[in-house]
Amino acid sequence: MAEYQEITGVAKYIRMSPRKVRLVADLVRGKRVDDAIGILKMTPKEAARAVEKAVNAAASNATNNYGLVREDLWITRIFADEGPTLKRMKAGARGRYKPILKRSAHITVGVTERAKES
């Protein structure tokens, strides 16, 4: 089997915890791009919209920049890294404060073209 080039798509600074994004990313890892989009459209989690955006970005990069066929694309890599954290505070009892961490994520999707399975 020949080695194929991996094309990536990235969605950065998604205002969501990477832990929540990883739950959705695990659903589509190793699937065909069209099947993954169908799964993500039916997933009730908010992170599914962000993962769908990253998958579409990778598929668009592959078709527009490299001339690959969308029906032959498979998700080879998908992961969610931690982005910058916004640190806020909330007043607590007895003059103290409680930290509020507003996390963000960077989603990276890698797709590769494979021949159609019969």
Image (cartoon, rainbow, N blue to C red):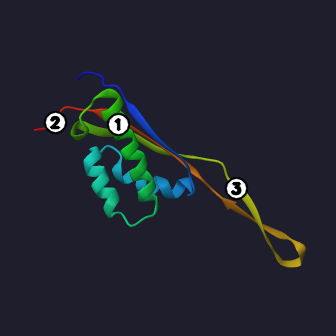
Q: Residue furthest top?
A: 2
Q: Which residue shows up at 30% across the image and 57% down it?
A: 39
Task: Tell me, yes or no, whether the two marked residues, 2 and 3, touch with CB atoms within 8 Å.
Answer: no
User: How many numbered discs?
Assistant: 3
Between 18 and 70, the residue placed more toward the observer is 70
- The disc, 3 or 1, on the residue closer to the chain's N-terminal end is 3
Between 116 and 1, the residue placed more toward the observer is 116
Quadrant in the rendering for residue 16 = bottom right
- Horizontal side, residue 91 vs residue 35: left or right: right
Residue 5 position within the rendered picture, expressed as x and y whole percent measured from the top left: 35, 25
Q: Residues within 10 Å of mark 2 (few under 14, many from 20)?
A: few
Q: CA distance from mark 3 to mark 1?
A: 31 Å
Amino acid type of the residue that numbered disc 1 sits on in the rendered structure: Val
Give the residue pinned by disc 3. 86
For the C terminus, the quadrant is: top left
Quadrant in the rendering for residue 96 = bottom right
Which mark identifies residue 116?
Answer: 2
Residue 95 seen in render? yes
Residue 58 position within the rendered picture, expressed as x and y whole percent measured from the top left: 38, 39
Between 60 and 113, the residue placed more toward the observer is 60
- The disc, 1 or 2, on the residue closer to the chain's N-terminal end is 1
Give the residue pinned by disc 1. 111
In the rendered view, tell whether residue 94 sits above or below residue 14. below
Q: CA distance from mark 1 to mark 2?
A: 15 Å
Amino acid type of the residue that numbered disc 2 sits on in the rendered structure: Lys
- Horizontal side, residue 6 vs residue 87: left or right: left
Amino acid type of the residue that numbered disc 3 sits on in the rendered structure: Leu
Residue 37 position within the rendered picture, expressed as x and y whole percent measured from the top left: 31, 52
